[in-house]
Amino acid sequence: MFSDGNDAGCCSNVLTARKFRERTPEDRVTYRRWARGIVLFYSALLLLSGIAIATYSGTGRSQSSNLLAASQRSYQQGGR
């Protein structure tokens, strides 16, 4: 059912090493800037996500621990 050229590689727009060498110097500079920008963007996103998780994960536990301790004190004192 499949014939030659029906694979995903035939339509790929990926810049291979051969295509990269055939490009003009301006195109190579543009590609490098674009690739660097993508890497920096996702690295910053990963870093900010890690900071957010580390910052907010600790507060949830301490708040629930404080609530648990307060409810236990209230129960021990005979209150509801």
Image: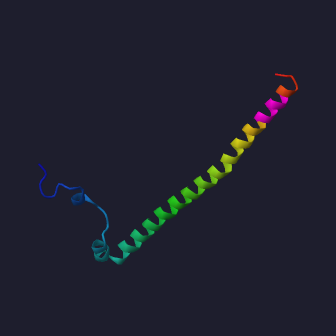
In the rendered image, the residue lying farthest to the front is 76
Query: Is 28 one of the magenta-colored residues?
Result: no
For image coordinates 69% across by 42% down, the residue present is 60
Q: Please indicate whether residue 9 sits to the left or right of residue 60 in the image.
A: left
Numbered range of the magenta stretch: 67-74
Q: Please indicate whether residue 30 sits to the left or right of residue 57 in the image.
A: left
When the figure is inspected, residue 77 is found, relative to residue 45, above or below; the finding is above
Q: Main secondary structure of the magenta part?
A: helix
For image coordinates 11% across by 54% down, the residue present is 3
Q: Quadrant of the C terminus?
A: top right
Residue 20, picture quadrant: bottom left
Colour mapping? rainbow
For image coordinates 79% across by 30% down, the residue present is 71
When the figure is inspected, residue 51 is found, relative to residue 69, above or below; the finding is below
In this rendering, the count of numbered labels is 0
Residue 65, picture quadrant: top right
For image coordinates 46% across by 62% down, the residue present is 38
Residue 9 location in percent, x, y?
24, 60
When the figure is inspected, residue 71 is found, relative to residue 61, above or below; the finding is above
In the rendered image, the residue lying farthest to the right is 77
Residue 29 location in percent, x, y?
41, 74
Q: Please indicate whether residue 6 sits to the left or right of residue 48 in the image.
A: left
Q: Nearer the viewer, residue 49 or 25?
A: 49
When the figure is inspected, residue 36 is found, relative to residue 62, above or below; the finding is below
Residue 41 location in percent, x, y?
51, 60
